[in-house]
Amino acid sequence: MSWFRKLWRRDRSGGRDEERLAVGSAADRLFERRDPLKEDLGRYKTFWLTNFAVDHPISVLTLFVLIVLGGLYSYLTIPKEASPDITVPFVAVNTIYSGVAPEDIETLITRPLEEELNTVRGINNVITVARVGRGSAYLWFKHGTDMDVAYREVRDRVER
């Protein structure tokens, strides 16, 4: 029997449950307040893996260390192709015009900028945002687009 079970079955006074129940009258035993944590565990179903883990802590620790070491070995030896470098085809254009209201930024900067940027090849989505003193355009391109060429095209359109 494991040390945990022995400790679990022990009464506060140090005696066994059977000895404690034999003391006193039948009325005392009838109205005695029972602590379910101190009752005999033999009548409960126990899971074999839990029993093994409690009875053999060194084995469980060894298994844990082996699993961690195996995971580290796998992580360090995994081929590069299993985790490729992913680049999101995205370009952001920010314009600053200090002290101007968002409505003016929208009419003077972001709408003409959006119309001009929509002509760039390979664009999937364009979102423009106007804030106080600042306008932004966010461009998402289709996957497989050469981002160096796309960046040059965007820069040329912004400079017009």
Image: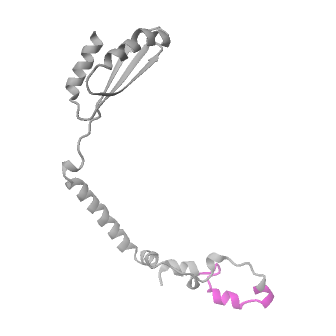
Left or right of 23, for residue 152: left
Residue 12's place in the image compared with 121, above or below, is: below
**Depth check, front residue: 125 or 136:** 125
Is 19 included in the stretch rendered in magenta?
yes
Seen at 74% across and 78% down, the residue is 33
Is 113 included in the stretch rendered in magenta?
no
Left or right of 145, for residue 104: right
Q: Quadrant of residue 41?
A: bottom right
Residue 5's place in the image compared with 141, above or below, is: below
Seen at 68% across and 87% down, the residue is 20
Seen at 39% across and 11% down, the residue is 109
Q: Is residue 27 visible?
A: yes
**Depth check, front residue: 131 or 51:** 131
Left or right of 64, for residue 20: right
Task: Please state the horizontal and vertical placement of residue 81, each as a whole percent of the image.
Answer: 19, 48
Task: Please state the horizontal and vertical placement of residue 68, each as a whole percent of the image.
Answer: 31, 61
- Bounds of the magenta span? 10-29
Left or right of 39, for residue 115: left
**Depth check, front residue: 66 or 44:** 44
Q: Residue furthest right?
A: 27
Task: Please state the horizontal and vertical placement of residue 8, each as a whole percent of the image.
Answer: 56, 78
**Depth check, front residue: 83 or 88:** 88
Task: Please state the horizontal and vertical placement of residue 48, each as a whole percent of the image.
Answer: 45, 79
